[in-house]
Image (cartoon, rainbow, N blue to C red):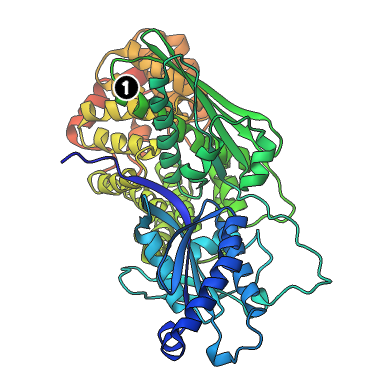
Protein backbone atom coordinates (compact mmCIF):
# COMPACT_ATOMS: atom_id res chain seq x y z
CA UNK A 1 0.00 0.00 0.00
CA UNK A 2 1.43 3.38 -1.00
CA UNK A 3 1.94 5.87 1.78
CA UNK A 4 2.30 9.64 1.48
CA UNK A 5 4.59 11.86 3.49
CA UNK A 6 3.14 12.82 6.87
CA UNK A 7 2.41 16.55 7.07
CA UNK A 8 3.59 18.22 10.25
CA UNK A 9 3.60 21.83 11.31
CA UNK A 10 4.01 24.02 14.34
CA UNK A 11 0.68 25.42 15.49
CA UNK A 12 -1.02 27.10 18.41
CA UNK A 13 -3.85 24.81 19.51
CA UNK A 14 -6.97 26.01 21.33
CA UNK A 15 -9.09 23.30 22.97
CA UNK A 16 -12.45 24.21 24.53
CA UNK A 17 -15.30 22.32 26.13
CA UNK A 18 -18.42 23.04 28.17
CA UNK A 19 -17.97 22.65 31.92
CA UNK A 20 -20.51 20.19 33.38
CA UNK A 21 -21.92 19.34 29.95
CA UNK A 22 -23.41 15.97 30.92
CA UNK A 23 -25.21 17.52 33.92
CA UNK A 24 -26.57 20.36 31.80
CA UNK A 25 -27.74 18.02 29.04
CA UNK A 26 -29.44 15.79 31.57
CA UNK A 27 -31.49 18.73 32.83
CA UNK A 28 -32.43 20.26 29.44
CA UNK A 29 -31.05 18.39 26.44
CA UNK A 30 -32.73 20.33 23.63
CA UNK A 31 -32.34 23.70 25.31
CA UNK A 32 -28.61 23.24 25.99
CA UNK A 33 -28.05 22.01 22.44
CA UNK A 34 -29.69 25.12 20.94
CA UNK A 35 -27.97 27.53 23.31
CA UNK A 36 -24.55 25.96 22.66
CA UNK A 37 -25.14 26.14 18.91
CA UNK A 38 -25.96 29.84 19.30
CA UNK A 39 -22.80 30.54 21.33
CA UNK A 40 -20.65 28.81 18.74
CA UNK A 41 -22.30 30.50 15.78
CA UNK A 42 -22.58 33.99 17.23
CA UNK A 43 -19.43 34.30 19.35
CA UNK A 44 -16.90 31.46 19.25
CA UNK A 45 -16.58 30.80 15.52
CA UNK A 46 -16.59 34.50 14.57
CA UNK A 47 -13.84 35.15 17.12
CA UNK A 48 -11.74 32.30 15.73
CA UNK A 49 -12.15 33.69 12.20
CA UNK A 50 -11.38 37.21 13.40
CA UNK A 51 -8.08 36.03 14.84
CA UNK A 52 -7.13 34.05 11.72
CA UNK A 53 -7.75 30.65 13.30
CA UNK A 54 -9.34 27.51 11.88
CA UNK A 55 -11.86 25.24 13.54
CA UNK A 56 -10.41 21.76 13.13
CA UNK A 57 -13.40 19.88 14.52
CA UNK A 58 -16.37 20.10 16.86
CA UNK A 59 -16.64 17.45 19.57
CA UNK A 60 -20.24 17.76 20.71
CA UNK A 61 -19.51 19.58 23.95
CA UNK A 62 -16.50 21.48 22.62
CA UNK A 63 -14.14 22.15 19.77
CA UNK A 64 -10.53 22.19 18.61
CA UNK A 65 -9.01 25.10 16.69
CA UNK A 66 -5.54 25.91 15.40
CA UNK A 67 -3.81 29.23 14.84
CA UNK A 68 -0.64 30.23 13.04
CA UNK A 69 0.06 32.79 15.78
CA UNK A 70 0.14 31.90 19.47
CA UNK A 71 -0.63 35.55 20.26
CA UNK A 72 -3.81 35.29 18.16
CA UNK A 73 -4.79 32.06 19.92
CA UNK A 74 -4.50 33.53 23.44
CA UNK A 75 -6.18 36.77 22.43
CA UNK A 76 -9.03 34.76 20.89
CA UNK A 77 -9.43 32.56 23.99
CA UNK A 78 -9.58 35.63 26.22
CA UNK A 79 -12.16 37.40 24.07
CA UNK A 80 -14.34 34.28 23.94
CA UNK A 81 -14.39 34.10 27.73
CA UNK A 82 -15.07 37.84 28.02
CA UNK A 83 -17.93 37.51 25.54
CA UNK A 84 -19.47 34.62 27.45
CA UNK A 85 -19.79 36.74 30.62
CA UNK A 86 -22.42 38.97 29.01
CA UNK A 87 -24.40 36.19 27.35
CA UNK A 88 -27.41 34.57 29.01
CA UNK A 89 -27.64 37.12 31.87
CA UNK A 90 -31.12 35.82 32.77
CA UNK A 91 -29.98 32.18 33.19
CA UNK A 92 -29.21 31.02 36.77
CA UNK A 93 -25.53 30.39 37.47
CA UNK A 94 -25.96 26.62 37.79
CA UNK A 95 -27.60 26.44 34.35
CA UNK A 96 -25.27 28.76 32.43
CA UNK A 97 -22.96 27.47 29.73
CA UNK A 98 -19.32 28.14 30.60
CA UNK A 99 -16.33 27.14 28.52
CA UNK A 100 -13.01 25.82 29.80
CA UNK A 101 -10.14 26.62 27.42
CA UNK A 102 -6.57 25.34 27.12
CA UNK A 103 -3.94 26.74 24.74
CA UNK A 104 -0.68 25.07 23.77
CA UNK A 105 2.00 25.56 21.14
CA UNK A 106 3.44 22.43 19.59
CA UNK A 107 4.24 20.27 16.60
CA UNK A 108 1.13 18.58 15.14
CA UNK A 109 0.43 15.86 12.59
CA UNK A 110 -2.10 17.15 10.07
CA UNK A 111 -4.87 15.20 8.37
CA UNK A 112 -7.72 16.55 6.27
CA UNK A 113 -10.21 16.97 9.12
CA UNK A 114 -8.08 16.54 12.23
CA UNK A 115 -4.75 17.21 13.89
CA UNK A 116 -2.84 14.90 16.26
CA UNK A 117 0.22 14.80 18.46
CA UNK A 118 1.51 15.84 21.88
CA UNK A 119 0.80 19.47 21.04
CA UNK A 120 -2.90 18.67 20.78
CA UNK A 121 -2.90 16.35 23.78
CA UNK A 122 -1.37 18.97 26.07
CA UNK A 123 -3.96 21.57 24.96
CA UNK A 124 -6.76 19.11 25.74
CA UNK A 125 -5.30 18.33 29.19
CA UNK A 126 -4.99 22.05 29.97
CA UNK A 127 -8.63 22.56 28.99
CA UNK A 128 -9.63 19.75 31.39
CA UNK A 129 -7.72 21.44 34.24
CA UNK A 130 -9.18 24.90 33.59
CA UNK A 131 -11.89 26.40 35.77
CA UNK A 132 -15.26 27.18 34.15
CA UNK A 133 -14.80 30.49 32.35
CA UNK A 134 -11.01 30.19 32.63
CA UNK A 135 -8.03 29.90 30.29
CA UNK A 136 -4.92 27.81 30.99
CA UNK A 137 -1.78 27.99 28.85
CA UNK A 138 1.42 25.95 28.75
CA UNK A 139 4.81 27.39 29.65
CA UNK A 140 5.72 27.54 25.94
CA UNK A 141 2.68 29.70 25.23
CA UNK A 142 3.35 31.90 28.26
CA UNK A 143 6.95 32.55 27.17
CA UNK A 144 5.70 33.75 23.78
CA UNK A 145 2.90 36.03 24.98
CA UNK A 146 3.88 37.36 28.39
CA UNK A 147 5.53 40.49 26.98
CA UNK A 148 3.21 40.83 24.00
CA UNK A 149 -0.25 40.78 25.54
CA UNK A 150 -1.50 42.93 28.43
CA UNK A 151 -3.04 39.94 30.22
CA UNK A 152 -2.14 38.93 33.82
CA UNK A 153 -1.16 35.29 34.35
CA UNK A 154 -0.66 33.24 37.50
CA UNK A 155 1.99 30.52 37.65
CA UNK A 156 0.32 27.28 38.80
CA UNK A 157 3.57 25.33 38.76
CA UNK A 158 4.18 21.94 37.17
CA UNK A 159 1.18 19.67 36.72
CA UNK A 160 1.19 15.95 35.95
CA UNK A 161 -1.42 15.41 33.23
CA UNK A 162 -2.91 12.24 31.83
CA UNK A 163 -0.97 10.41 29.08
CA UNK A 164 1.84 12.99 29.08
CA UNK A 165 5.06 11.55 30.53
CA UNK A 166 6.64 14.84 31.55
CA UNK A 167 5.11 17.39 33.93
CA UNK A 168 3.63 20.47 32.22
CA UNK A 169 4.19 23.94 33.65
CA UNK A 170 0.85 25.71 33.63
CA UNK A 171 -0.20 29.36 33.75
CA UNK A 172 -3.75 30.59 34.37
CA UNK A 173 -5.19 33.78 32.96
CA UNK A 174 -6.19 35.70 36.09
CA UNK A 175 -9.89 36.63 36.52
CA UNK A 176 -9.20 40.33 35.90
CA UNK A 177 -7.78 39.37 32.51
CA UNK A 178 -11.10 37.80 31.52
CA UNK A 179 -13.25 40.61 32.93
CA UNK A 180 -14.98 42.67 30.20
CA UNK A 181 -13.19 45.86 29.18
CA UNK A 182 -15.05 48.97 30.23
CA UNK A 183 -16.52 51.23 27.57
CA UNK A 184 -14.14 53.98 28.59
CA UNK A 185 -11.00 51.91 28.50
CA UNK A 186 -8.71 52.67 25.62
CA UNK A 187 -7.83 49.87 23.20
CA UNK A 188 -4.48 48.28 23.76
CA UNK A 189 -1.70 48.83 21.28
CA UNK A 190 -1.08 46.04 18.76
CA UNK A 191 1.17 43.40 20.24
CA UNK A 192 4.72 43.30 18.92
CA UNK A 193 5.62 40.38 16.73
CA UNK A 194 7.57 37.58 18.47
CA UNK A 195 11.30 38.24 18.36
CA UNK A 196 12.14 35.25 16.14
CA UNK A 197 9.04 34.97 13.98
CA UNK A 198 8.91 34.30 10.25
CA UNK A 199 6.61 33.34 7.42
CA UNK A 200 7.93 31.31 4.49
CA UNK A 201 5.99 32.49 1.46
CA UNK A 202 5.30 30.01 -1.36
CA UNK A 203 8.31 29.98 -3.69
CA UNK A 204 7.36 31.25 -7.13
CA UNK A 205 7.69 28.92 -10.12
CA UNK A 206 9.29 31.09 -12.81
CA UNK A 207 9.65 28.20 -15.26
CA UNK A 208 7.44 27.73 -18.27
CA UNK A 209 7.00 24.16 -17.09
CA UNK A 210 4.01 24.00 -14.70
CA UNK A 211 5.22 20.59 -13.51
CA UNK A 212 8.00 22.38 -11.66
CA UNK A 213 5.38 23.83 -9.34
CA UNK A 214 5.54 20.76 -7.11
CA UNK A 215 9.27 21.34 -6.69
CA UNK A 216 8.72 24.98 -5.64
CA UNK A 217 5.95 23.95 -3.23
CA UNK A 218 8.14 21.18 -1.82
CA UNK A 219 10.94 23.64 -1.03
CA UNK A 220 8.44 25.95 0.70
CA UNK A 221 7.01 23.17 2.83
CA UNK A 222 10.37 21.67 3.77
CA UNK A 223 11.92 25.02 4.72
CA UNK A 224 8.85 25.71 6.89
CA UNK A 225 9.24 22.33 8.59
CA UNK A 226 13.00 22.67 9.09
CA UNK A 227 12.69 26.17 10.56
CA UNK A 228 10.01 24.93 12.95
CA UNK A 229 12.54 22.53 14.48
CA UNK A 230 14.88 25.34 15.51
CA UNK A 231 14.57 26.37 19.15
CA UNK A 232 12.72 29.66 19.78
CA UNK A 233 11.77 30.35 16.15
CA UNK A 234 8.04 30.88 15.61
CA UNK A 235 7.01 29.88 12.08
CA UNK A 236 3.66 30.63 10.45
CA UNK A 237 1.98 27.42 9.33
CA UNK A 238 2.18 26.22 5.75
CA UNK A 239 -1.61 26.51 5.31
CA UNK A 240 -1.65 30.18 6.27
CA UNK A 241 1.40 31.00 4.14
CA UNK A 242 -0.11 29.33 1.07
CA UNK A 243 -3.13 31.67 1.18
CA UNK A 244 -0.72 34.29 -0.23
CA UNK A 245 0.25 32.13 -3.21
CA UNK A 246 0.27 34.02 -6.55
CA UNK A 247 -0.60 37.28 -4.76
CA UNK A 248 1.49 40.47 -4.69
CA UNK A 249 2.87 40.89 -1.18
CA UNK A 250 4.09 43.91 0.75
CA UNK A 251 6.44 42.73 3.49
CA UNK A 252 5.44 45.43 5.99
CA UNK A 253 1.74 44.77 5.53
CA UNK A 254 2.29 41.01 5.71
CA UNK A 255 4.24 41.40 8.94
CA UNK A 256 1.33 43.30 10.49
CA UNK A 257 -1.28 40.84 9.22
CA UNK A 258 0.53 37.72 10.46
CA UNK A 259 2.36 39.19 13.44
CA UNK A 260 5.85 38.27 12.23
CA UNK A 261 9.15 40.13 12.04
CA UNK A 262 10.65 38.37 9.05
CA UNK A 263 9.54 37.19 5.64
CA UNK A 264 11.34 34.59 3.50
CA UNK A 265 10.47 34.62 -0.17
CA UNK A 266 12.00 32.90 -3.14
CA UNK A 267 11.68 31.58 -6.66
CA UNK A 268 12.49 28.50 -8.73
CA UNK A 269 13.49 28.61 -12.39
CA UNK A 270 14.40 25.75 -14.71
CA UNK A 271 17.15 26.45 -17.24
CA UNK A 272 17.59 23.38 -19.43
CA UNK A 273 18.88 20.69 -17.09
CA UNK A 274 19.64 23.26 -14.41
CA UNK A 275 17.49 24.48 -11.54
CA UNK A 276 18.09 27.94 -10.09
CA UNK A 277 16.62 28.72 -6.68
CA UNK A 278 16.74 32.21 -5.20
CA UNK A 279 15.86 32.97 -1.58
CA UNK A 280 15.89 36.22 0.36
CA UNK A 281 15.13 37.24 3.93
CA UNK A 282 13.26 40.49 4.50
CA UNK A 283 12.78 42.49 7.70
CA UNK A 284 9.00 43.02 7.84
CA UNK A 285 9.36 46.13 10.01
CA UNK A 286 11.73 48.03 7.70
CA UNK A 287 11.33 46.16 4.38
CA UNK A 288 15.13 45.82 4.33
CA UNK A 289 16.72 42.79 2.65
CA UNK A 290 18.92 41.08 5.23
CA UNK A 291 20.19 38.02 3.39
CA UNK A 292 20.02 36.48 -0.07
CA UNK A 293 21.31 33.27 -1.59
CA UNK A 294 21.26 31.64 -5.02
CA UNK A 295 21.54 27.92 -5.68
CA UNK A 296 22.22 26.48 -9.13
CA UNK A 297 22.29 22.72 -9.50
CA UNK A 298 21.59 20.10 -12.15
CA UNK A 299 18.37 18.09 -12.01
CA UNK A 300 19.87 14.59 -11.83
CA UNK A 301 18.34 13.95 -8.40
CA UNK A 302 15.56 16.40 -7.59
CA UNK A 303 14.88 14.90 -4.16
CA UNK A 304 18.51 15.25 -3.07
CA UNK A 305 18.61 18.75 -4.54
CA UNK A 306 15.47 19.79 -2.66
CA UNK A 307 16.89 18.38 0.56
CA UNK A 308 20.22 20.18 0.12
CA UNK A 309 18.61 23.54 -0.63
CA UNK A 310 16.06 23.44 2.17
CA UNK A 311 18.63 22.31 4.74
CA UNK A 312 21.03 25.05 3.69
CA UNK A 313 18.36 27.75 3.88
CA UNK A 314 17.12 26.62 7.29
CA UNK A 315 20.58 26.32 8.81
CA UNK A 316 21.65 29.73 7.50
CA UNK A 317 18.47 31.47 8.61
CA UNK A 318 18.88 30.11 12.14
CA UNK A 319 22.05 32.18 12.59
CA UNK A 320 20.89 35.11 10.44
CA UNK A 321 17.77 35.66 12.54
CA UNK A 322 19.73 35.57 15.79
CA UNK A 323 22.22 38.10 14.41
CA UNK A 324 19.42 40.38 13.20
CA UNK A 325 17.57 40.25 16.51
CA UNK A 326 20.72 40.72 18.57
CA UNK A 327 21.39 43.92 16.62
CA UNK A 328 18.06 45.40 17.76
CA UNK A 329 18.22 47.32 21.01
CA UNK A 330 15.14 47.47 23.19
CA UNK A 331 14.34 49.91 25.99
CA UNK A 332 13.19 47.14 28.31
CA UNK A 333 15.18 44.00 27.46
CA UNK A 334 13.77 40.67 28.60
CA UNK A 335 15.23 37.21 29.06
CA UNK A 336 14.98 36.33 25.39
CA UNK A 337 16.72 39.58 24.46
CA UNK A 338 19.64 38.66 26.73
CA UNK A 339 19.71 35.12 25.32
CA UNK A 340 19.85 36.39 21.73
CA UNK A 341 22.67 38.80 22.56
CA UNK A 342 24.54 35.99 24.28
CA UNK A 343 24.12 33.65 21.34
CA UNK A 344 25.37 36.36 19.00
CA UNK A 345 28.42 37.04 21.20
CA UNK A 346 29.18 33.31 21.29
CA UNK A 347 28.96 33.12 17.49
CA UNK A 348 31.72 35.71 17.05
CA UNK A 349 34.48 33.21 17.80
CA UNK A 350 36.75 32.00 20.55
CA UNK A 351 38.37 34.70 22.67
CA UNK A 352 38.34 35.65 26.33
CA UNK A 353 36.30 38.73 25.52
CA UNK A 354 33.66 36.86 23.50
CA UNK A 355 33.33 34.15 26.15
CA UNK A 356 32.96 36.73 28.91
CA UNK A 357 30.44 38.70 26.87
CA UNK A 358 28.31 35.65 26.10
CA UNK A 359 28.44 34.34 29.67
CA UNK A 360 27.45 37.76 30.97
CA UNK A 361 24.32 37.89 28.79
CA UNK A 362 23.31 34.34 29.72
CA UNK A 363 23.81 35.17 33.41
CA UNK A 364 21.42 38.11 33.05
CA UNK A 365 18.83 35.93 31.34
CA UNK A 366 19.08 33.36 34.13
CA UNK A 367 18.79 36.06 36.80
CA UNK A 368 15.51 37.19 35.23
CA UNK A 369 14.16 33.63 35.05
CA UNK A 370 16.12 31.12 37.19
CA UNK A 371 13.99 28.23 35.79
CA UNK A 372 14.68 28.98 32.14
CA UNK A 373 16.06 25.76 30.64
CA UNK A 374 17.32 27.72 27.65
CA UNK A 375 19.34 30.12 29.82
CA UNK A 376 20.64 27.24 31.95
CA UNK A 377 21.69 25.23 28.90
CA UNK A 378 23.34 28.07 27.01
CA UNK A 379 25.25 29.24 30.08
CA UNK A 380 26.40 25.67 30.78
CA UNK A 381 27.56 25.19 27.21
CA UNK A 382 29.48 28.48 27.21
CA UNK A 383 31.23 27.59 30.46
CA UNK A 384 32.18 24.19 29.03
CA UNK A 385 33.41 25.57 25.72
CA UNK A 386 35.50 28.12 27.60
CA UNK A 387 37.22 25.16 29.28
CA UNK A 388 37.69 23.43 25.92
CA UNK A 389 39.28 26.60 24.52
CA UNK A 390 41.50 26.97 27.60
CA UNK A 391 40.36 30.52 28.13
CA UNK A 392 39.37 30.26 31.78
CA UNK A 393 41.28 30.64 35.02
CA UNK A 394 38.86 28.30 36.83
CA UNK A 395 38.29 25.19 34.67
CA UNK A 396 37.21 22.96 37.56
CA UNK A 397 34.72 25.56 38.79
CA UNK A 398 33.32 26.08 35.30
CA UNK A 399 32.83 22.34 34.81
CA UNK A 400 31.16 21.91 38.21
CA UNK A 401 28.74 24.74 37.56
CA UNK A 402 27.99 23.51 34.03
CA UNK A 403 27.20 20.04 35.41
CA UNK A 404 24.62 21.46 37.84
CA UNK A 405 22.99 23.69 35.24
CA UNK A 406 22.65 20.78 32.82
CA UNK A 407 21.18 18.52 35.53
CA UNK A 408 18.57 21.15 36.33
CA UNK A 409 17.76 21.78 32.66
CA UNK A 410 17.34 18.09 31.79
CA UNK A 411 15.27 17.45 34.92
CA UNK A 412 12.85 20.19 33.85
CA UNK A 413 12.93 19.36 30.13
CA UNK A 414 14.37 15.91 29.28
CA UNK A 415 13.97 16.44 25.52
CA UNK A 416 15.55 19.91 25.46
CA UNK A 417 17.77 20.24 22.40
CA UNK A 418 19.87 22.94 24.07
CA UNK A 419 20.39 20.89 27.22
CA UNK A 420 21.59 17.83 25.30
CA UNK A 421 23.92 20.02 23.25
CA UNK A 422 25.32 21.52 26.44
CA UNK A 423 25.84 18.05 27.91
CA UNK A 424 27.70 16.93 24.80
CA UNK A 425 29.98 19.94 25.08
CA UNK A 426 30.58 19.31 28.78
CA UNK A 427 31.54 15.68 28.11
CA UNK A 428 33.87 16.92 25.40
CA UNK A 429 35.48 19.35 27.85
CA UNK A 430 36.10 16.36 30.13
CA UNK A 431 37.75 14.41 27.32
CA UNK A 432 34.85 11.91 27.22
CA UNK A 433 34.64 11.87 23.45
CA UNK A 434 32.74 8.61 23.00
CA UNK A 435 30.14 9.58 25.63
CA UNK A 436 29.54 12.95 23.97
CA UNK A 437 28.55 11.48 20.60
CA UNK A 438 25.06 10.21 21.65
CA UNK A 439 24.24 13.64 23.11
CA UNK A 440 25.03 15.33 19.80
CA UNK A 441 23.11 12.63 17.94
CA UNK A 442 20.07 13.47 20.08
CA UNK A 443 20.42 17.10 19.01
CA UNK A 444 20.52 16.10 15.35
CA UNK A 445 17.46 13.88 15.78
CA UNK A 446 15.59 16.96 17.06
CA UNK A 447 17.08 19.29 14.45
CA UNK A 448 18.78 17.56 11.49
CA UNK A 449 20.21 20.91 10.33
CA UNK A 450 22.21 21.63 13.48
CA UNK A 451 25.51 22.32 11.78
CA UNK A 452 27.29 22.80 15.12
CA UNK A 453 26.24 19.37 16.43
CA UNK A 454 27.23 17.73 13.13
CA UNK A 455 30.67 19.32 13.32
CA UNK A 456 31.05 18.40 17.00
CA UNK A 457 30.36 14.74 16.29
CA UNK A 458 33.16 14.94 13.74
CA UNK A 459 35.45 16.48 16.36
CA UNK A 460 34.69 13.66 18.78
CA UNK A 461 35.38 11.06 16.11
CA UNK A 462 38.66 12.76 15.27
CA UNK A 463 39.92 12.39 18.84
CA UNK A 464 38.97 8.73 19.12
CA UNK A 465 40.88 8.01 15.92
CA UNK A 466 38.01 7.77 13.40
CA UNK A 467 39.38 10.62 11.32
CA UNK A 468 38.03 9.36 7.97
CA UNK A 469 34.52 9.48 9.46
CA UNK A 470 35.09 12.99 10.80
CA UNK A 471 35.93 14.60 7.45
CA UNK A 472 32.51 14.16 5.76
CA UNK A 473 30.82 15.51 8.90
CA UNK A 474 32.89 18.71 8.72
CA UNK A 475 32.06 18.96 5.03
CA UNK A 476 28.35 18.52 5.72
CA UNK A 477 28.47 21.25 8.37
CA UNK A 478 30.18 23.62 5.92
CA UNK A 479 27.62 22.91 3.20
CA UNK A 480 24.79 23.80 5.58
CA UNK A 481 26.17 27.28 6.29
CA UNK A 482 29.56 28.19 4.80
CA UNK A 483 29.57 31.64 6.38
CA UNK A 484 29.17 30.31 9.94
CA UNK A 485 31.60 27.41 9.65
CA UNK A 486 34.86 28.89 10.87
CA UNK A 487 35.37 26.12 13.45
CA UNK A 488 34.55 23.43 10.88
CA UNK A 489 37.11 24.92 8.46
CA UNK A 490 39.72 24.68 11.23
CA UNK A 491 38.78 21.11 12.11
CA UNK A 492 38.79 20.03 8.49
CA UNK A 493 42.20 21.65 8.05
CA UNK A 494 43.60 19.76 11.05
CA UNK A 495 42.16 16.49 9.70
CA UNK A 496 43.87 17.12 6.35
CA UNK A 497 47.10 18.00 8.14
CA UNK A 498 47.16 14.69 10.01
CA UNK A 499 46.46 12.82 6.78
CA UNK A 500 49.50 14.49 5.13
CA UNK A 501 47.99 16.39 2.13
CA UNK A 502 49.32 19.70 3.46
CA UNK A 503 48.12 21.88 0.56
CA UNK A 504 44.57 20.81 1.35
CA UNK A 505 45.16 21.62 5.01
CA UNK A 506 46.41 25.10 4.15
CA UNK A 507 43.34 25.84 2.03
CA UNK A 508 40.92 25.01 4.84
CA UNK A 509 43.01 26.66 7.55
CA UNK A 510 43.27 29.87 5.54
CA UNK A 511 39.48 29.75 5.22
CA UNK A 512 39.32 29.38 9.01
CA UNK A 513 41.62 32.37 9.46
CA UNK A 514 39.32 34.53 7.35
CA UNK A 515 36.25 33.57 9.40
CA UNK A 516 37.74 33.23 12.92
CA UNK A 517 40.93 35.33 12.88
CA UNK A 518 41.08 35.44 16.70
CA UNK A 519 41.15 31.65 17.16
CA UNK A 520 44.67 30.90 18.47
CA UNK A 521 44.63 27.17 17.77
CA UNK A 522 43.57 27.70 14.16
CA UNK A 523 46.44 30.16 13.70
CA UNK A 524 48.94 27.77 15.30
CA UNK A 525 47.75 24.89 13.11
CA UNK A 526 48.15 27.08 10.02
CA UNK A 527 51.68 27.92 11.23
CA UNK A 528 52.40 24.18 11.43
CA UNK A 529 51.09 23.63 7.89
CA UNK A 530 53.23 26.43 6.48
CA UNK A 531 56.23 25.00 8.35
CA UNK A 532 55.77 21.54 6.82
CA UNK A 533 55.96 22.92 3.25
CA UNK A 534 58.99 25.11 4.01
CA UNK A 535 57.17 28.47 4.16
CA UNK A 536 59.07 29.36 7.31
CA UNK A 537 58.47 33.12 7.26
CA UNK A 538 54.72 32.72 6.92
CA UNK A 539 54.82 29.97 9.55
CA UNK A 540 56.67 32.24 12.00
CA UNK A 541 54.19 35.07 11.37
CA UNK A 542 51.19 32.84 12.10
CA UNK A 543 52.84 31.46 15.22
CA UNK A 544 53.47 35.02 16.42
CA UNK A 545 49.77 35.81 15.90
CA UNK A 546 48.77 32.72 17.87
CA UNK A 547 51.00 33.82 20.76
CA UNK A 548 49.41 37.28 20.78
CA UNK A 549 45.94 35.79 21.07
CA UNK A 550 46.58 33.97 24.36
CA UNK A 551 47.49 35.37 27.75
CA UNK A 552 49.72 32.46 28.77
CA UNK A 553 52.89 30.85 27.41
CA UNK A 554 51.37 27.70 25.89
CA UNK A 555 53.00 28.40 22.51
CA UNK A 556 56.41 29.10 24.05
CA UNK A 557 57.77 25.59 23.38
CA UNK A 558 56.76 22.11 22.26
CA UNK A 559 57.13 20.80 25.81
CA UNK A 560 54.96 23.59 27.19
CA UNK A 561 52.31 23.06 24.52
CA UNK A 562 52.13 19.35 25.31
CA UNK A 563 51.85 20.12 29.02
CA UNK A 564 49.23 22.87 29.12
CA UNK A 565 48.33 23.48 25.51
CA UNK A 566 45.47 22.75 23.21
CA UNK A 567 45.89 18.98 23.29
CA UNK A 568 46.42 18.35 26.98
CA UNK A 569 44.30 20.69 29.09
CA UNK A 570 42.12 17.87 30.45
CA UNK A 571 43.28 14.29 31.19
CA UNK A 572 42.66 12.09 28.12
CA UNK A 573 41.89 15.19 26.03
CA UNK A 574 44.82 14.30 23.82
CA UNK A 575 42.92 11.37 22.31
CA UNK A 576 43.95 7.82 21.54
CA UNK A 577 47.58 6.76 20.83
CA UNK A 578 46.90 6.71 17.08
CA UNK A 579 45.95 10.40 17.14
CA UNK A 580 48.88 11.33 19.36
CA UNK A 581 51.28 9.61 16.94
CA UNK A 582 49.76 11.40 13.93
CA UNK A 583 50.01 14.78 15.63
CA UNK A 584 53.63 14.16 16.57
CA UNK A 585 54.63 13.63 12.94
CA UNK A 586 52.51 16.45 11.53
CA UNK A 587 51.28 19.17 13.89
CA UNK A 588 54.25 19.25 16.27
CA UNK A 589 56.76 18.64 13.47
CA UNK A 590 55.38 21.64 11.58
CA UNK A 591 55.56 23.87 14.67
CA UNK A 592 59.21 22.95 15.13
CA UNK A 593 59.84 24.13 11.57
CA UNK A 594 57.87 27.31 12.31
CA UNK A 595 60.47 28.11 14.96
CA UNK A 596 58.93 26.73 18.16
CA UNK A 597 61.75 25.43 20.40
CA UNK A 598 61.60 22.00 22.00
CA UNK A 599 62.00 23.26 25.60
Q: Is there any visible trace of residue 359 in the rendered image?
A: yes
Q: Is there any visible trace of residue 365 in the rendered image?
A: no
Q: Quadrant of the C terminus?
A: top left
Mark 1 crowd level (few <14, some 14–19, many ≥20, 10 Å Cα): few
Picture layout, residue 20 above or below residue 516? below
Side (left or right) of 51 relative to 232: right
Quadrant in which residue 3 is drawn: top left
Image coordinates of residue 496 in percent, x first then y, are 30, 20
Side (left or right) of 428 relative to 256: left
SS of the residue under disc 1: helix
Picture layout, residue 589 above or below residue 246? above
Image coordinates of residue 186 in percent, x first then y, are 81, 65
Q: Quadrant of the N terminus?
A: top left
Residue at image point 29% right, 15% down: 300
In depth, the one of 137 and 50 nearer the eye is 50
Picture layout, residue 565 above or below residue 205? below
In depth, the one of 69 and 320 nearer the eye is 69
Quadrant in which residue 210 is drawn: top left
Q: Which residue is mark 1?
A: 302
Image coordinates of residue 400 in percent, x first then y, are 40, 59
In depth, the one of 217 and 49 nearer the eye is 49
Residue at image point 58% right, 27% down: 291
Quadrant in which residue 74 is drawn: bottom right
Image coordinates of residue 394 in percent, x first then y, are 46, 53
Amino acid sequence: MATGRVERRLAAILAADVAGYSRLMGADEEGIHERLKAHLGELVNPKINEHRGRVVKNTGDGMLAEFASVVDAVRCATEIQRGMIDREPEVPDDRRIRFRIGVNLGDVIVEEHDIFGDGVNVAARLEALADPGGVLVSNTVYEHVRDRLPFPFEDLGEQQVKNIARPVRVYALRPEGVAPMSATSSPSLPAAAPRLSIVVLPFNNLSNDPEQQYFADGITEDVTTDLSRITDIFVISRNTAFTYKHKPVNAKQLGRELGVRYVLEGSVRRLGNQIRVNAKLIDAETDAHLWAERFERNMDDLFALQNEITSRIAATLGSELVAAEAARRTENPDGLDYILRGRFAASKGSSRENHADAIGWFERALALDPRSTMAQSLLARQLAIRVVDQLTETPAGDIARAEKLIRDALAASPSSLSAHYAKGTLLRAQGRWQDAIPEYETVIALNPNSMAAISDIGWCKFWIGRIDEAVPLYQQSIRLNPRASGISYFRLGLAHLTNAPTEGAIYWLEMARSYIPAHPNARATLASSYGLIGETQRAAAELAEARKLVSDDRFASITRLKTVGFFSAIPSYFGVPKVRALLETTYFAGLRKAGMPEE
